[in-house]
Image (cartoon, helix red, strand yellow):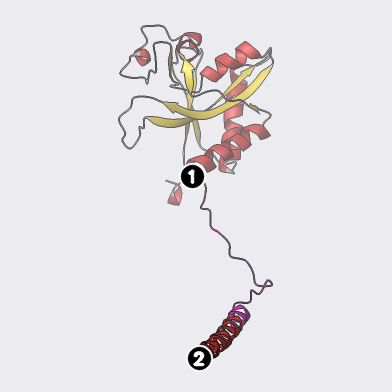
Amino acid sequence: LGQAANQVRAEIEELLAEKIAELKEKEKQAKLAAEVIDVTEPGKINKLGTKHPLTVTMEEISKVFKSMGFSLTEGPEVETVFNNFDGLNAPADHPARDWTDTFYISEDTLLRTQTSPVQVRTLQSQQPPIRVFAPGRTFRCDTADATHSPMFHQIEGLVIDTETNLAHLKTTLVEFMKLFFETDDVALRFRPSYFPFTEPSYEADVGCSRENGE
């Protein structure tokens, strides 16, 4: 009697297992049918953000200089003291060489205070004629406020040729302003200025048009 009961129980368990497997398979097929992916639907676009305004501005300035025949050249942000100061006629007693004014890494290396070391590197590696521009980040121990930052950006140009003169510099600046601001109506003022490693020197002020021409 006991053996017969065990056999019946085994048969019942086998039937239950088969039914459970059948139900699971049906559930699986129903789930797959409900989750069918329509490959014709448009994909989900991932938003990666936008470029920083400084990056956009640097790229626009670079584009203008390239259109004017300048070649882009760059240099390291960690520079030698010679390239940053001595090679640019900034002597040992120059105030910018003070340890409290410049980020020194060692006695002979620092974070560049200007992009001008690229000029030194260019003159050491190329022969005239030279027509390059150098964009990049620079660093100084300035207290952050509305007009100062310990890190800021510069772009400068270097032109060396037998016929180059100050008139070419002025024309270059005028044409750059017109191209960058996309207008021929640019108010510019040129005034003499002193820089220890350039002579003669001047600066350009850019005006803007306000409402009613003020």
Left or right of 64? Residue 81 is left
Task: Work out which residue is located at the far top of the displayed protein and give it.
Answer: 92
- Residue underneath mark 1: 53
The residue carrying pointer 1 sits among few (fewer than 14), some (14 to 19) or many (20 or more) residues within 10 Å by Cα, namely few
Q: Is residue 57 above or below residue 2?
A: above
Residue 137 percent location from the top left of the image: 47, 29
With respect to residue 106, does 149 lie above or below? below
Magenta stretch in the rendered image: 27-52
Q: Secondary structure at mark 2?
A: helix
In this picture, residue 14 sits left or right of residue 110: right
The image quarter containing residue 108 is: top left
Nearest the eye: 8 or 104: 8
Mark on residue 5?
A: 2
Calculate the distance from the C-alpha at mark 1 to the C-alpha at mark 2: 84 Å
- Residue 142 placed where, x, y %? 33, 27
Label ID, residue 179:
none
Please say whether residue 198 is one of the residues in the magenta stretch. Answer: no
In the foreground, 180 or 152:
152
At horizontal 37% and vertical 16% (from top left) the residue drawn is: 96
Residue 55 image offset from top left, x and y in percent:
52, 40
